[in-house]
């Protein structure tokens, strides 16, 4: 990722941040919602359908740049192999050299982190942060929001120039990272453009901006630019770009522990 | 025998230069051993007392519980366990709940991960006396359910003052993040090494932050009126909760005891057994301090080795000195034998001279060692932040010279002097009177 791209992302994020504050009234969702509103469920189902790449194998390269005030930028580059139909993906760290060979393999609810230094697999929460950044591993897989959250409508809002429906998610169980989330779904195509993640005490912890999507098959989308802003750490932001997207078939062997072991050699 | 003993004492300084040279060696060995034992006794007692005052009971009840297919650190049904402990051990025992967890603290762009200790301020008052507040007070902190008392260095790191609010954010035991706001109600320092990093909050606040149920705690500390009865108390305690449906065990070794006592709330693990249960681990303070005992034993061992080398050198000196002494006193030996003293009596006289010298100087050395320890312990301050911090009591090295230890050291040196005096003394005793009187030195 070059400096120009980062600047463009930062500008887009700044724009989104400034206008995201214009959340309109209609904050009707109860903090303790215990049921899913059918309309909210329909909105969530709508974007999940578009992001569900079932039937398509996707290979792409993510570059994460974490910027934190007073610290050097942290850069990670990860190769992703994704097969939503089998609810599986493989992440392989390519940069920096200190992380090279490390990888994740997810199969259903099981997520394994491979550590080449010790040649062992560590079982992790599927929502693990990737390489200690603000981006979680489940971001790369098939979304399954309604299995984990109650959804309710929380009004409308404008994010940048987009009119959005706001859907509030309340965790069914406390084993998710963020017990409360607010999704800002673009009315034009139903895709999320902003996600606010809250603690159980409803303190805003993180805001993710989905700045750009790419349609890789008819009605199927994948995000290509994302910005995650940490609300507690001063000026900590993670920029994520998704490049080199290919939908060619991926060998089955890629979705295995053996593949990660082989790649680290 | 009495006359021989009196004569032996008179003969101790017959050759003052030689006696003092040997005697000083005895004194140095006694002094070193006294100081070493004072150090190890002091270290063991100090660590034990500090740990009990800060982070363990005479018996600590910790453990895990399984619920809905997951295993969590800590205890459920804590009030029930408290009641069982109180009923089993009687009114003289007290049971204090603790909640331990780690959480990140955020303040004005700075963040740091800290270890939090949640206590019941009304019950757990023993900590108050160990905290010197430079801002706020125990009462202010105890009166505010969202109050936090911070160690001075933590407050300085963040630039926090009493009255400031800080945000805490943690990944709870269930995996979800939770946040809270704490108000600084106290900034303190302490001489207790084991309390140094305590970020003190109310137990209920910490439990709420961890999204844990109202009957959960990390551990229960049981304090007894007689700490020496910890093992017996543990035995009694083991039986009672078991009959109430708890699974009770003791740590397999000292390492497991330390792990059980120090475990803070962490994320759950999957439960393979698939049945809800509460598993208690009862650790005595002796087990928790097992590693300290090992370290102290190692220190004692090294000291003992040094002392053994010194004593060996002294033993050679004794041997040589006594041989020289026998040679110098051949006429005297001959006279004693001529007037009727048998061989054993002459041998005994020389052995007693050696023992008397050893007794006098080793006693003096032990007393000097004890006085030096008391002086260092009373007057010489040691920086609290240094590597010796764990051994400090109120900023001074914890040294405990004991009379029993001193007597053992003196007797051991005297016994060694007797053993190494015997062979040259026996040689002197075996010389026939006529040979002795005919010989000249």
Image (spheres, grey):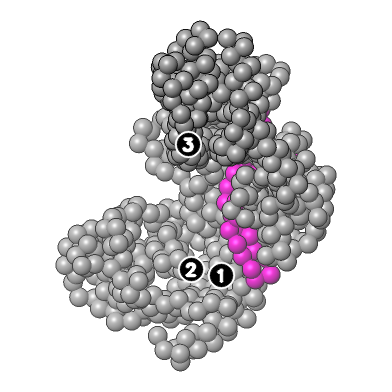
Answer yes or no: is residue B411 visible: no
User: Is there a contact, CB below 8 Å, between mark 1 and mark 2?
Assistant: yes
Both marks 2 and 3 on one chain: no
User: Is there a contact, CB below 8 Å, between mark 2 and mark 3?
Assistant: no
Q: Chain of mark 2?
A: A
Both marks 1 and 3 on one chain: no
Q: Chain of mark 3?
A: B
State the image coordinates of residue A240 (x, y, percent, origin top left). Answer: 43, 77
Q: Provide the secondary structure element on which disc 3 rests.
A: helix
Which labelled disc corresponds to residue A59? none
B53 within the magenta span: no
Q: Which residue is mark 1?
A: A230
- Residue drawn at point x = 48 percent, y = 47 percent: B267
Report crowding for label 1: few under 14, some 14 to 19, many 20 or more residues within 10 A (C-alpha).
Answer: many
Q: CA distance from mark 1 to mark 2?
A: 7 Å
Answer yes or no: is residue B15 visible: yes
Q: Which residue is mark 2?
A: A134
Both marks 1 and 2 on one chain: yes
- Residue drawn at point x = 46 percent, y = 20 percent: B437
Single out the mark in the foreground, 1 or 3.
3
Q: Is B79 situated above or below B104? A: above
Q: Which residue is mark 3?
A: B317
Report the magenta residues as a range. Answer: B95-121
Frontmost residue, B91 versus A200: B91
Q: Provide the secondary structure element on which disc 2 rests.
A: loop
Residue B65 vs residue B219: left or right?
A: left
Q: Chain of mark 1?
A: A
B109 within the magenta span: yes
Frontmost residue, B38 versus A30: B38
State the image coordinates of residue B127 (x, y, percent, origin top left). Answer: 73, 40
């Amino acid at each position: 990722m070059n400096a120009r791209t980062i600047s463009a992302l930062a500008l887009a994020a700044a724009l989104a941040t400034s206008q995201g504050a214009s959340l309109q009234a209609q904050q009707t969702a109860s903090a303790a919602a215990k049921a899913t509103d059918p309309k909210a469920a329909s909105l969530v189902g709508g974007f999940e359908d578009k992001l569900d790449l079932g039937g398509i194998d996707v290979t792409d390269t993510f570059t994460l740049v974490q910027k934190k005030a007073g610290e050097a930028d942290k850069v990670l580059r990860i190769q992703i192999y994704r097969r939503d139909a089998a609810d599986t993906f493989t992440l392989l760290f390519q940069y920096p050299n200190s992380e090279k060979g490390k990888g994740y393999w997810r199969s259903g609810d099981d997520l394994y982190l491979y550590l080449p230094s010790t040649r062992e697999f560590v079982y992790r929460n599927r929502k693990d942060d990737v390489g200690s950044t603000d981006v979680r591993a489940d971001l790369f897989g098939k979304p399954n929001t309604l299995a984990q959250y109650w959804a309710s409508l929380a009004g409308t809002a404008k994010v940048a120039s987009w009119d959005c429906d706001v859907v509030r998610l309340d965790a069914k169980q406390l084993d998710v990272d963020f017990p409360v989330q607010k999704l800002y779904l673009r009315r034009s195509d139903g895709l999320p453009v902003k996600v606010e993640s809250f603690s159980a005490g409803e303190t805003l912890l993180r805001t993710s901006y989905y700045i750009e999507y790419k349609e890789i098959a008819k009605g199927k989308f994948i995000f290509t630019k994302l910005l995650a802003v940490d609300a507690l750490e001063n000026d900590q932001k993670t920029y994520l770009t998704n490049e080199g997207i290919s939908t060619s078939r991926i060998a089955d062997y890629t979705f295995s522990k053996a593949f990660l072991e082989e790649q680290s050699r | 025998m009495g006359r021989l003993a009196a004569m032996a004492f008179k003969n101790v300084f017959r050759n003052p230069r030689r006696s003092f040279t040997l005697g000083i060696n005895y004194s140095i060995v006694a002094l070193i051993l006294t100081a070493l034992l004072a150090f190890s006794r002091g270290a063991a007692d100090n660590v034990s007392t500090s740990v009990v005052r800060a982070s363990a009971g005479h018996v600590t009840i910790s453990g895990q519980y399984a619920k809905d297919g997951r295993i969590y650190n800590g205890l459920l049904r804590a009030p029930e366990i408290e009641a069982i402990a109180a009923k089993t051990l009687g009114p003289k025992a007290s049971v204090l709940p603790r909640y331990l967890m780690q959480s990140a603290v955020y303040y004005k762009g700075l963040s740091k991960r800290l270890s939090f200790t949640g206590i019941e301020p009304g019950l757990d008052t023993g900590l108050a006396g160990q905290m010197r507040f430079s801002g706020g007070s125990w009462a202010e902190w105890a009166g505010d359910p969202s109050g936090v008392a911070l160690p001075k260095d933590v407050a300085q790191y963040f630039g926090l003052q009493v009255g400031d609010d800080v945000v805490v954010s943690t990944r709870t035991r269930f995996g979800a993040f939770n946040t809270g706001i704490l108000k600084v109600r106290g900034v303190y320092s302490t001489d207790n090494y084991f309390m140094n990093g305590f970020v003190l909050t109310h137990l209920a606040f910490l439990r709420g932050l961890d999204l844990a149920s109202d009957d959960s705690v990390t551990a229960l500390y049981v304090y007894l009126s007689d700490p020496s009865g910890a093992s017996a108390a543990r035995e009694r305690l083991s039986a009672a909760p078991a009959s109430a449906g708890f699974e009770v065990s003791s740590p397999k070794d000292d390492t497991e005891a330390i792990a059980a006592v120090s475990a803070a709330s962490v994320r759950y693990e999957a439960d393979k057994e698939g049945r809800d249960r509460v598993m208690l681990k009862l650790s005595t303070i002796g087990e928790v301090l097992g590693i300290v005992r090992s370290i102290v034993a190692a220190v004692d061992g090294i000291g003992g080795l040094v002392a053994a080398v010194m004593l060996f050198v002294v033993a050679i000196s004794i041997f040589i000195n006594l041989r020289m002494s026998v040679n110098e006193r051949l006429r005297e030996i001959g006279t004693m034998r001529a007037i009727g003293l048998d061989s054993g009596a002459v041998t005994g006289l020389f052995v007693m001279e050696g023992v008397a010298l050893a007794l006098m100087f080793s006693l003096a050395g032990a007393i000097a060692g004890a006085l030096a320890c008391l002086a260092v312990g009373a007057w010489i301050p040691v920086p609290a932040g240094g590597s010796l911090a764990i051994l400090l009591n109120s900023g001074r090295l914890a040294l405990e010279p004991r009379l029993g230890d001193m007597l053992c050291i003196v007797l051991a040196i005297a016994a060694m002097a007797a053993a190494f005096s015997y062979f040259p003394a026996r040689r002197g005793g075996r010389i026939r009177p006529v040979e002795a009187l005919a010989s000249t030195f």
